[in-house]
Amino acid sequence: MSDPPGTVRDMKAALQHVCRECGYRTAKWFGKCPGCSAFASVFEEAARPPLRAVVPIDQVPLEAGHRDRTGIGELDRALGGGLVPGAVVLLAGDPGIGKSTLLLSALHRLSQLGQVLYVSGEESLQQIRLRGERLGTLSPALYLAAETDAEAALEHARKLRPRILAVDSIQTLALRNLDSACGSVTQVREVGHRLAAYAKETGTPVIIVGHVTKEGSIAGPRVLEHLVDAVLFFEGDRSHAYRVLRAHKNRFGSTNEIGVFEMKSEGLVEVPNPSALFLAERPRDAAGSAVVATMSGTRPLLVEVQALVADSSSGGSPRRTAIGVDGARVALLTAVLERKEGLVLADKDIYVSVAGGAALPEPAGDLAIAAALASSLRDECISAGTLVVGEIGLAGEIRAVGQIEQRLAEGAQLGFTRCVLPQTNRMRTRDAPLELCGVSSVGEAMTALFQ
């Protein structure tokens, strides 16, 4: 006769022993793992919960989705509209870039919706209070906990049942039953899994702060990026006031959206017009400069592409440097200019950069790069009121780009009066807010720009 559920024998059967090195499972404890022969690696673990029901896709119940807006427009834009219930968001960036400042400001605004919990393993409660005094984020619904024990942090969350849980940073939390050091690969992975499980079980959004190594990757295992729902990178130079928040992964929104902030004494302030920011220090009547209208998700951005073509300073191979653009794309456009326009660039040092720390990831910036290269080589300026948009093919043709109406509207808003764009886009565009010059080839584009 079997024992009823809940008896001592039933509880023993419900326990399993798992090797932390290879994952081998057994009902009996061993000092040496039978799977990988590692010593002292087998630990006790409760049995897995019962399996959930298998449901046909057309019978899965749907709930009305909603998002908790942080009240910071640029952050909400990068998140895809706000925080989704049960979502796990990783906010990564260099130390001192402004992650904690942005997080505290967002939690202060989110506390208007309900209680929020901020767990910090790096700062004391007094340090956070002092920063809150400076930022004006002293909401009584914002609860703080200075904790480095991951289980204790989760216990605080289970008791408080906050609307939002934030952890700063995951490298400072550790599980006591693991022998590895705090911040190690094992600790970061396991703590990340516990936080993600808590988010999915309770439906509570969890924001995790993660530091970035010198190589630019998130400190800890790559699996941390895979188990979260969104990865936001805070980019920028600590010596400059401007920061860019870029979504590298987002299961609930676009990965092309960015948020732009300015660091001031009162904290991070949103930049409502990033195009004006990126063009603020644009030189007038300078060769090697072209402005392109690029799309960052649903937002049009005007950025300046700068190029410098100079005689090679070394006797060996000429230098090729690209910042903010794909170096392979620059090499391709250089070859097209040489082949189709007869420009001599093979023996020149070439430097291409997107001003203001912006990036130009889409092919719509090809024509602007080519125009900047030709402008620098010829030492001829492109008109300050001219916008350049278009993709260049290997045959030298200018291909159409998408969302041209939004690009033109942004250019007109910032005072541009003329746009050199693909002929296909020109034919499809009605009632443009500025003068349009359609081109079908690189040669036509160069004539239109330097006539």
Image (cartoon, helix red, strand yellow):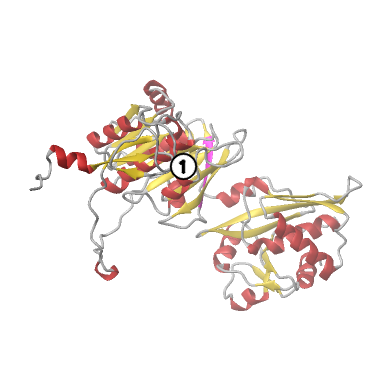
- Residue 126 lies, in percent from the top left, at 38, 21
Q: Amino acid at mark 1?
A: Leu
Asked if residue 253 lies left or right of residue 359, the reply is left
Whether the magenta-drawn stretch holds residue 216 is answered as no
Q: Give the residue displayed 89% in from the left and 45% down from the top.
A: 314
- Residue 351 lies, in percent from the top left, at 77, 50
Asked if residue 433 lies left or right of residue 349, the reply is left
Whether residue 103 is visible here, answered yes or no, is: yes
- Give the magenta range: 258-263
Number of numbered labels in the structure image: 1
- Residue 128 sits in quarter: top left
Q: Is residue 245 above or below residue 170?
A: below
Residue found farthest to the top? 126
Q: Secondary structure at mark 1?
A: strand
The residue wearing badge 1 is 91
Q: Give the residue displayed 83% in from the left and 68% down from the top.
A: 339
From the viewer's side, name the closer residue of 426 and 370. 370
Whether residue 141 is visible here, answered yes or no, is: no
From the viewer's side, name the closer residue of 163 and 423. 163
Mainly helix, strand or loop, the magenta region?
A: strand
Give the position of the C terminus as an image quadrant.
bottom right
Asked if residue 436 lies left or right of residue 174, the reply is right
